[in-house]
Image (cartoon, rainbow, N blue to C red):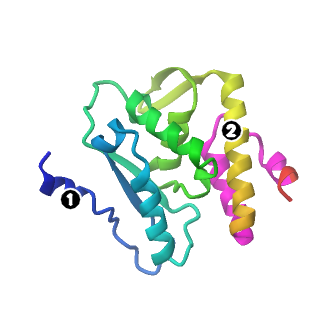
């Protein structure tokens, strides 16, 4: 890919929706950043968005990867380079899911990069997964705990919406809406 193409793709622009203050904000991660496990751009863009969007970033960040070698039959969350990058980001930012948008199935893809997947299979057009249950349940609890705790400190008014996003993102290992409400009152 030429430098000019990198620059165009790297603009991190998604079209604003008229009258929607919660349109998604994109952070594009290049193959070079993946290869170098470089997460600085993510934090730089998040800081930029925080300054330009009056800090209202809950459920708005979309992470996209580009320029990496495609592997036939593999989804992004199965590519070790992407999984490694996401795991590094999550280890430094355990409340990451507070920010992640559901647009483009983004939060779900990032969750799948973190989860231990035993196997994938297709039911028609839909992909199903077999997870290592114990490890994944622990991950779900961790994701929910950090995102909701951070959300309460950051923006108490948006907690119900965040709980809904988390509940949809971490299926089938949903720790339950009741349990989320009980733990985070």
Q: Quadrant of the C terminus?
A: bottom right
SS assignment for the magenta stretch, majority: helix
The stretch in magenta equals 155-181
Residue at the image point whose x is 69% and y is 62% from the top: 151
- Sequence-wise, the earlier of marks 1 and 2 is 1
Which of these two is toward me, 60 or 34?
A: 34
Q: Position of residue 160 (x, y in %)?
A: 73, 62
Residue depicted at 56% across the width and 58% down the height:
99
Element carrying mark 1: helix
Q: Is residue 20 visible?
A: no
Quadrant of residue 69 in the image? Answer: top left
Q: Is residue 19 above or below residue 126?
A: below
Could you say which disc has been placed on residue 184 in the image? none
Label 2 residue SS: helix
What residue would you read off at disc 1? 7
Q: Residue at (39%, 45%) from the top-left corner?
A: 38
Residue annotated with mark 2: 140
Q: Which quarter shows the N terminus?
A: top left
Judge from the rendering whether residue 41 lies leftward or rightward of residue 141; answer left or right: left
Q: Residue at x 67, y 47 (%)?
A: 167
Is residue 169 toward the left or the right of residue 42 in the image?
Answer: right
In this orientation, does residue 171 appear? yes
Instruction: From this view, report whether residue 17 is shown above or below residue 97.
Output: below
In x, y percent, where is residue 123? 47, 26
């Amino acid at each position: 890919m030429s430098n000019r193409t990198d620059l165009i793709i790297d603009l991190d622009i998604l079209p604003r929706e008229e009258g929607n203050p919660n349109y998604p904000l994109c952070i594009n991660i290049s193959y070079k950043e993946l290869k170098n496990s470089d997460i600085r751009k993510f934090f730089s863009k998040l800081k930029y968005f925080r300054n330009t969007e009056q800090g209202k970033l809950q459920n708005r960040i979309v992470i996209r990867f580009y320029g990496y070698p495609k592997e036939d039959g593999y989804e992004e969350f199965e590519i070790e380079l992407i999984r490694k990058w996401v795991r590094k980001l999550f280890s430094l930012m355990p409340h990451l899911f507070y920010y992640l948008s559901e647009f483009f199935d983004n939060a779900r893809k990032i969750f799948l990069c973190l989860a231990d997947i035993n196997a994938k299979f297709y039911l028609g057009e839909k992909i199903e997964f077999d997870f290592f249950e114990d490890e994944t349940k622990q991950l779900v609890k961790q994701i929910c705990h950090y995102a909701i705790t951070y959300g309460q400190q950051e923006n108490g008014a948006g907690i119900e919406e965040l709980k809904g996003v988390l509940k949809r993102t971490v299926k089938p290992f949903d720790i339950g809406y009741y349990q989320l409400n009980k733990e985070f009152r």
